[in-house]
Structure formats: structure tokens, C-alpha cells
Amino acid sequence: MRYFAVVLFTVFLAGNALGSQCPTLIKQINHQLQSAQLDIEAEAKVKELRDRGESLHNQGKHSEAVIALKKAIDELDDAL
């Protein structure tokens, strides 16, 4: 029983840590988009990934949201 409580507590904390990372990544993407000189296709792809990440964050799927948001950042870095 004690082991189960520790695992549950750890999972809860990990979810909260990822959940607070999402808004920071979204702000970072928005800031980079303002100053980046991207072509229309690259900008659309980054915005799509950002929107998907934000949607997943709002659904409570934080680990999936972080993956999508980091892909958006990678796309931005590749385009610059």
C-alpha cells in the first residue's frame, strides 16, 4: 500500500511539472514567431503544432502537449 501511494504521488507531481511547462513553451513559440522571418508553409506548420500543443494542454494531456510544442520549436529553429 505504501508503494502504491509513493507511485501515485510521483505520477501526480510529474503531471503538474509538465503542465506548468506548457504555457512557458507556448510563450516562447509566440515570441519567436514575432521576430522570425518564415515562409508561409513553415509558419503554418509551427502554428499548427503550437495550437495542437495548447489544445492537448487544455485537455490535461501534458506530456503529449510538450512533445508537440517542442516539435514546433524544432521547426522554428530549422527554419531560421
Image (cartoon, rainbow, N blue to C red):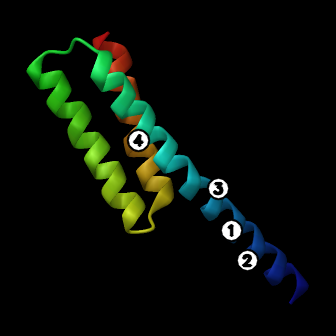
Q: Is residue 20 left or right of residue 29?
A: right
SS for callout 3: helix
Q: Amino acid at mark 2?
A: Leu
SS for callout 4: helix
SS for callout 1: helix
Give me the C-alpha separation between circle 2 and circle 1.
5 Å
Disc 3: which residue: 17
- Residue depicted at 54% across the width and 58% down the height: 19
Disc 2: which residue: 8
Q: Amino acid at mark 3?
A: Ala
Mark 4 and mark 1 residues within 8 Å of each other at the beta carbon: no
Quarter of the figure with residue 72: top left
Mark 2 and mark 4 residues within 8 Å of each other at the beta carbon: no
- Residue depicted at 64% across the width and 55% down the height: 17
Q: Position of residue 27 (x, y in %)?
A: 43, 38
Image quarter in which the N terminus is found: bottom right
- Mark 3 crowd level (few <14, some 14–19, many ≥20, 10 Å Cα): few
Give me the C-alpha separation between circle 2 and circle 3.
14 Å
Disc 4: which residue: 26
